[in-house]
Image (spheres, rainbow, N blue to C red):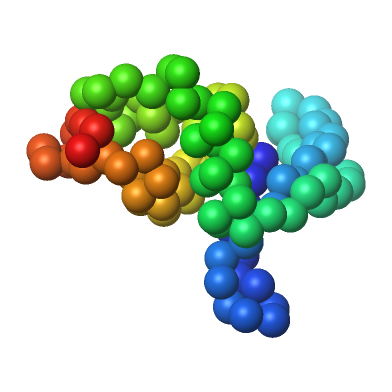
Amino acid sequence: MYIKTACTKCGNPDFHDIHWWIIGEIKKGQTTARVDEMEVYDSVSEEELATQIVCELRGFMYNGITVDEFCRILKKYYGVASKYCCDLIQRMKKELDMYCPDRQHLYYV
């Protein structure tokens, strides 16, 4: 899962690919979960992540794709946390020269 933080040096947004290992236990009918281990696999800037995704999705993007569908792709295939999808979509709209007049569908300029 990618999470977003601010760079400690420049303050620009960075995305970190974090993997969690969670242990779930059931005791006396109560379910509990705790984080056993967490590891950062990769760190990239917002611009780098957007560029990587744009390069891979260029063939799958089409005129009129819905923002919801694009967000679902980001979550499912790239592990971007839901609350950061809108930020990335804004960045990718610039990269792909797209606009969103009705705030639901993305169109090429």
Can residue 27 be seen in the rendering of this structure?
Answer: no
Residue 18 in the figure: left or right of residue 73: right
Residue 62 in the figure: left or right of residue 7: left
Who's the residue at 50% across and 35% down the image? Answer: 54
Who's the residue at 11% across and 38% down the image? Answer: 102
- Residue furthest toward the left? 102
Q: Position of residue 46 (x, y in %)?
A: 56, 56
Residue 99 in the figure: left or right of residue 28: left
Instruction: Depth check: give the residue in front, 51 or 33.
Output: 51
Can residue 49 be seen in the rendering of this structure?
Answer: yes
Q: Quadrant of residue 56?
A: top right
Instruction: Depth check: give the residue in front, 17 or 51.
Output: 51
Instruction: Depth check: give the residue in front, 13 or 21.
Output: 13
- Residue furthest toward the bottom? 9
Q: Is residue 43 above or below residue 69?
A: below
Quarter holding the C terminus is top left
Q: Position of residue 70 (x, y in %)?
A: 39, 29
Q: Quadrant of residue 13?
A: bottom right
Who's the residue at 62% across and 80% down the image? Answer: 10
Quarter holding the N terminus is top right
Q: Position of residue 49 (x, y in %)?
A: 59, 47
Q: Is residue 44 above or below residue 102?
A: below
